[in-house]
Structures are given as C-alpha cells and as structure tokens.
Amino acid sequence: FMLLLLGCFDIGYQVYLTALLNGEIQKSARDATLETKSLSALDEAVKTQIRQLAPTANIAVTRVAYQGYKDIGRAETFSDGNANGKCDHNEPYTDENGNGTWDRDLGKQGNGGARDVVKYNIAVTYKALFPMWKFLGSSEYRTLNSTMLLKNQPFSDQTKFSPVNRTCA
C-alpha cells in the first residue's frame, strides 16, 4: 500500500510540475513575441516559478529562430555525392541562411526578428522526491521538456536572405 501511495505522489508531482512548466513556457513565449521584456528577464521569471516547486532543478532554456514553419529542423539543400548524410568533399549546397557554411538545421540561436518562427524549449531536470526509482531500476533524476512554437509579431520587415550556391569544404 505504501509503495502504491508513494507512486501516486511521485506521478502527481510530475504531472503538476509538467502543468506548471507548460503554463510558464506559454506565457514567456507570448511575451517574447510581443517584445515586452528582455529574453533574460523572461527566462528568469520562468526559472523563478519552476524553482518554487523544484528548488534544485537544473533548467535549460533554448530558442531557435526560423524564417517560417516549413524550415523547422530542415537542413540546407545539398548534393550528397558520397551518401554519408553530411555536406563534405566539395559537394555543392545552397546557403539559405547566409552564414557561409552548410547547416544541418537552418535555425539561428535566439529569438530572431520580425515574423520569424521561434522554437522555444525548456528542459527541467530534477531529483525525484520519492525513492520509487530504486524499485523500478531507473535514474533518480527526471527530465521534463516543454516546447512552444510561436511567430514573432510584425513589428518590422522580416530579414530575408538570398540563397547562394556554395561548395562544402
């Protein structure tokens, strides 16, 4: 009965922390698209809320900006002559984001600019409150992730890049 009770408490804590995390990422992501506060202030507000429930949690925040929804997680176009899945050995590619190198992911770190789509992710790693992990043979640390996709407000014109054909080194 005690194991069942501890298991219920452990799951309840995880569900509550997940709900808090999802609510905080939604609020912070919305505020970021409106540019009402600095990104560091938004991140600190999220961390403060999460640490009220998980004081020793490790919290990692990432933002990656894309030109549009279709670009999320997409690599730059290239001819894979040796079929190894990466651009090398003088294989031609199209530099779509204007940074001069082939990228497996077109995104740029940060909140991007006007009309950019931002993939905002928060990962929370915390030590389990109850020793259920010992009985299940798992780790005593749990990681929760929450991701939000939002498009920045049109506060100016979106930065556009002209694709350039290049060759990989």
Image: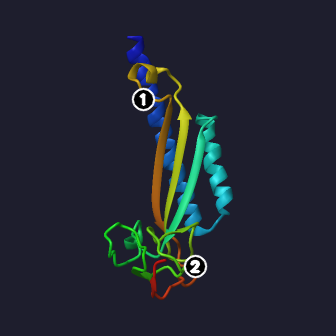
Q: Secondary structure at mark 1?
A: helix
Q: Nearer the viewer, mark 2 or mark 1?
A: 1
126 up-or-down from 1: above or below: below
Q: Secondary structure at mark 2?
A: loop
Can you give x and y, in whole percent of width and height, for residue 161 in the image? 50, 85
> 47 and 26: which one is in front?
47
- Number of disc labels: 2
Identify the image quadrant of residue 9. top left
Can you give x and y, in whole percent of width and height, for residue 148 in the image? 46, 58
Can you give x and y, in whole percent of width and height, for residue 140 in the image? 50, 28
Q: CA distance from mark 2 to mark 1?
A: 43 Å
Q: Which residue lies at the image location 50% right of the left edge and 74% below the top edge?
A: 116
Q: Amino acid at mark 1?
A: Ile
Q: Is residue 109 left or right of residue 9?
A: right
Q: Which mark is residue 87?
A: none
> 146 and 77: which one is in front?
77
Can you give x and y, in whole percent of width and height, for residue 68 in the image? 43, 74
127 up-or-down from 91: above or below: above
Q: Amino acid at mark 2?
A: Phe
**The N terminus appears in which quarter of the rendering?**
top left
Q: Residue furthest top?
A: 1
Q: Which residue lies at the image location 55% right of the left edge and 77% below the top edge?
A: 114
Identify the residue position indicated by label 2 in the image: 155
Q: Residues within 10 Å of mark 2 (few under 14, many from 20)?
A: few
Q: Residues within 10 Å of mark 1 (few under 14, many from 20)?
A: few
Q: How is the image coloured?
A: rainbow
Q: Which residue lies at the image location 52% right of the left edge and 47% below the top edge?
A: 123
Identify the residue position indicated by label 1 in the image: 11
58 up-or-down from 167: above or below: above
Identify the image quadrant of residue 82. bottom left
State which tag comes first along the sequence, 2 or 1.
1
Q: Is residue 87 left or right of residue 46?
A: left
